[in-house]
Image (spheres, grey):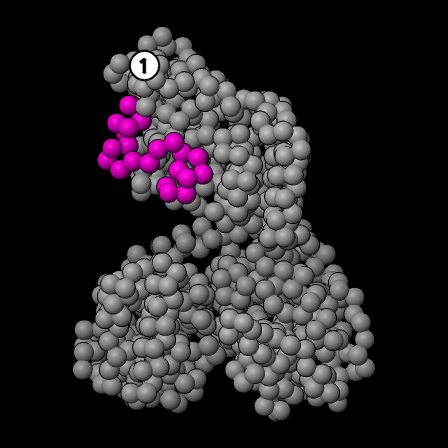
């Protein structure tokens, strides 16, 4: 053994070839934390000091290669000044450069995921051999940053400007075929042949058949494009990236600028430019929010992993109700490997549910995501039925019938009589109390909520709702089933609207008050889209369905009369009374026409303004900042109240529910992180400024307490 550390070892093999292996002890994956970087430096020194080593292969002792930098260290590091962040990047790059400068052939064997810093490690090697099972990428832009271990320097010198910009600015995870085609790797081999293939390549270098020094030199020199071609290539790429990323995501554009600035420089000078650019984006609010989002997502997954440990085994599922939601649930369950029975009381409904599943599967076949044989297999695992004949073997049942308390209670009580004692029941209700529905059951402990979002196959969130008598085992089983379906469950306690709708409808209430006070709903939509929402509130209500919105708003008003009842006519009520239900009947706040692809396209409709005149003040222009404040305060304060009332277990879970469920702008991190970005004291002051609008705008006690102590929701 040449060197043995806690993260890296160097062992001599045969013929003067050594193996440098990453195997971080106590972790399931390799990552570049501070300890690994220090160990890597020692391994380099030991390799350099050995006269026995003539060539080197780089491997992993894990199922993955290296997943990247340790993101848990980012929060502390990004709180430092730009100069300190740049220094961290530069010091790490000194280690990578020292490895690259070892005057022996170095071949990396990429056995699994090599992401971010893991791929940058591969880039400092002279050659890259990739398993057909591996995937690689530079996903840093998804965290609001860009590669800082030399990725912006080495990638364009190895694969050209266009390919480098695509890999870095999109942050996409790439398969072996793409990696080989673009020149990021030099060979793709069968997984079992990977180790030998890397050794063989080192031997070819040692035999003089391959000039490894020439290959390395390419990464040390400026880009070889003539100045005019170089300028044109980067200008074209910058324009494209700016168009796709938009102003809310500065990291991709900054990465291209860094690559262009460094394109005429040698490696060391170029790495200085990279470090400075990295430090600049690391200090942006987007980086703070997106890194925080990643950590919150990891926290949610960790919580769910602990909860699901006590779940019952799920071999067979069932869904009651075969409409669009029932068909979507059946599709998702079958697609992810859990066979499901779909029951309804009418053949027509079953046909609708099966057609929904068939349509979704056919789209996957058309896009090349599955073949016809797989489609047939998935479809055959959905069993439509009009009776309860096979329900004694079902482990979990999701009720998805009409949103009516009495109907749901009757259906749940009926199915409870047909199943085994331990079968778990769930309701897909979006508004009705789980505790109320459980009153119809003999074993309410086996019942909980499982609120899917529409369309089921696209929306990642499932709210798992705990009623007053729901058991821990039931919650665990519903969480495990949601995970098996490829969804992100968030466990919440029962209350009107649960978590997501309880928080969403104050946002809609803010919209209603703005229209009441003379705001143009189109201006509000444009401002909130510019803020980062996928669509503005009027458009969103049209998509959700005006009738659905009016019904849910009544549930919220009945549940929280002190702040969610209003003494004016809401614009959604006006649309509802005039049978303007949104996209579902072609007219709401907007009119809908089919585009060339047959999808609904919104068109401004003057009739909406005429209908709103009797309930709205004279139309006037509002300042964008006032619109944002009046829309966001009610949503954020209600999120705080949900945390305060123990409806949701943590700030991370609250924020992730809004990201997963309603498309809260990711670069803002969620309602609570958005409050943190402004500052709890400043946000409480903002609440005071608009408190005259009603109880929805008053700062909750938890917010006041944090403001007084100078605390935030996220450390």
Q: Based on the picture, tell me whether residue 339 belongs to the magenta stretch.
A: no
Q: Tell me which residue sits at (64%, 26%) in the image.
A: 264
The residue furthest top is 51
The image quarter in which residue 640 lies: bottom right
x, y (%) of residue 504? 57, 71
x, y (%) of residue 312? 25, 64
Q: Tell me which residue sits at (29%, 23%) in the image.
A: 199
Q: Which of 306 and 343 is in front in this view?
A: 343
Judge whether residue 287 can be spotted in this image.
no
Report the magenta stretch's main SS. Answer: helix
x, y (%) of residue 31? 42, 35
Q: Is residue 397 left or right of residue 642?
A: left
Residue under circle 1?
207
Quadrant assignment for the N terminus: top left
Q: Which of 380 and 406 is in front in this view?
A: 380
* Vertical side of 211 occupied by 80: above or below: below
Judge whether residue 37 can be spotted in this image.
yes
Q: Nearer the viewer, residue 157 or 715?
A: 157
Q: Say what secondary structure mark 1 lies in.
A: loop
Mark 1, residues whose alpha carbon is within 10 Å: few (<14), some, or many (≥20)?
A: few
Q: Based on the picture, tell me whether residue 179 belongs to the magenta stretch.
A: yes
The residue segment tinted magenta is 176-200
Q: In this view, does 233 lie to the left or right of 682?
A: left
């Amino acid at each position: 053994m040449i060197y043995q550390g806690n993260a890296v070892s160097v062992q001599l093999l045969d013929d003067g070839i050594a193996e440098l292996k990453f195997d971080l002890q106590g972790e399931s994956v390799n990552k570049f934390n501070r300890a690994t970087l220090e160990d890597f430096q020692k391994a380099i020194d030991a390799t350099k000091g050995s006269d026995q080593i003539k060539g080197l292969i780089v491997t992993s002792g894990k199922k993955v290669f290296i997943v990247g930098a340790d993101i848990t260290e980012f929060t502390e590091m990004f709180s430092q000044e730009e100069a300190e962040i740049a220094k961290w990047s530069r010091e790490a790059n000194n280690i990578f450069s020292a490895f690259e400068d070892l005057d022996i052939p170095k071949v990396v064997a990429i056995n699994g995921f090599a992401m971010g810093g893991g791929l940058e490690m591969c880039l400092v090697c002279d050659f890259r051999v990739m398993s057909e099972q591996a995937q690689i990428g530079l996903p840093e832009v998804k965290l609001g940053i860009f590669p800082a271990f030399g990725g912006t320097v080495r990638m364009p010198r190895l694969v050209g400007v266009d390919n480098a910009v695509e890999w870095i600015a999109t942050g996409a995870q790439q398969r072996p075929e793409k990696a080989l085609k673009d020149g990021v790797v030099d060979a793709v081999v069968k997984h079992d042949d990977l180790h030998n293939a890397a050794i063989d390549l080192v031997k070819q270098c040692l035999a003089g058949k391959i000039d490894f020094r020439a290959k390395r030199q390419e990464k040390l020199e400026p880009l070889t494009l003539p100045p005019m071609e170089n300028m044109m290539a980067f200008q074209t790429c910058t324009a494209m990236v700016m168009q796709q990323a938009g102003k809310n995501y500065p990291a991709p554009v900054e990465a291209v600028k860094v690559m262009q600035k460094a394109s005429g420089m040698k490696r060391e000078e170029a790495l200085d430019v990279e470090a400075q650019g990295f430090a600049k984006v690391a200090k942006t609010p987007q980086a703070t929010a997106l890194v925080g989002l990643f950590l919150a997502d990891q926290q949610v997954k960790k919580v769910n992993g602990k909860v699901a440990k006590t779940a019952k085994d799920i071999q067979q599922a069932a869904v009651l109700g075969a409409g669009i939601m029932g068909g979507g649930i059946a599709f998702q369950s079958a697609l992810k490997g859990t066979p499901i029975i779909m029951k309804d009381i009418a053949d027509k409904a079953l046909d609708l549910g099966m057609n929904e599943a068939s349509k979704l599967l056919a789209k996957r076949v058309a896009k090349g995501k599955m073949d016809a044989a797989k489609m047939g297999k998935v479809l055959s695992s959905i069993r439509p039925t009009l009776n309860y004949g096979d329900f004694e073997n079902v482990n979990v049942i999701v009720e998805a019938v009409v949103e009516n308390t009495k109907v749901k209670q009757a259906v749940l009580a009926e199915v409870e009589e047909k199943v085994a004692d331990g079968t778990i029941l769930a309701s897909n209700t979006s508004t009705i109390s789980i505790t109320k529905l459980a009153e119809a059951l003999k074993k309410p402990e086996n019942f909980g909520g499982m609120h899917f979002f529409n369309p089921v196959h696209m929306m990642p969130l499932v709210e798992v709702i705990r009623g007053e008598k729901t058991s821990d085992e039931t919650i665990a089983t519903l969480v495990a089933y949601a995970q098996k379906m490829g969804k992100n469950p968030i466990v919440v306690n029962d209350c009107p609207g649960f978590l997501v709708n309880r928080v969403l409808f104050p946002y809609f209430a803010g919209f209603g008050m703005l229209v009441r006070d003379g705001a143009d709903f189109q201006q509000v939509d444009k401002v909130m889209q510019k803020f980062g929402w996928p669509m503005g509130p009027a458009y969103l209500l049209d998509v959700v369905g005006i009738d659905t919105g009016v019904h849910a708003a009544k549930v919220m008003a009945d549940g929280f009369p002190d702040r969610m009842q209003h003494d004016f006519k809401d614009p959604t009520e006006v649309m509802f009374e005039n049978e303007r239900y949104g996209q579902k009947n072609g007219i709401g706040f907007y009119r809908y026409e089919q585009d060339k692809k047959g999808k609904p396209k919104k068109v401004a409709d003057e009739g909406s303004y005429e209908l709103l005149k009797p309930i709205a003040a004279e139309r006037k222009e509002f300042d964008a900042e006032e619109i944002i404040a009046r829309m966001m305060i009610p949503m954020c304060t209600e999120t705080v109240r949900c945390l305060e009332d123990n409806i949701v277990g943590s700030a991370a879970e609250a924020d992730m529910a809004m990201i997963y469920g309603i498309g809260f702008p990711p670069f803002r991190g969620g309602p609570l992180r958005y409050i943190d970005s402004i500052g709890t004291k400043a946000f409480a002051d903002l609440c005071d400024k608009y408190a005259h609008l009603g109880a929805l705008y008053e700062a909750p006690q938890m917010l006041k307490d944090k403001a007084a102590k100078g605390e935030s929701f996220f450390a």
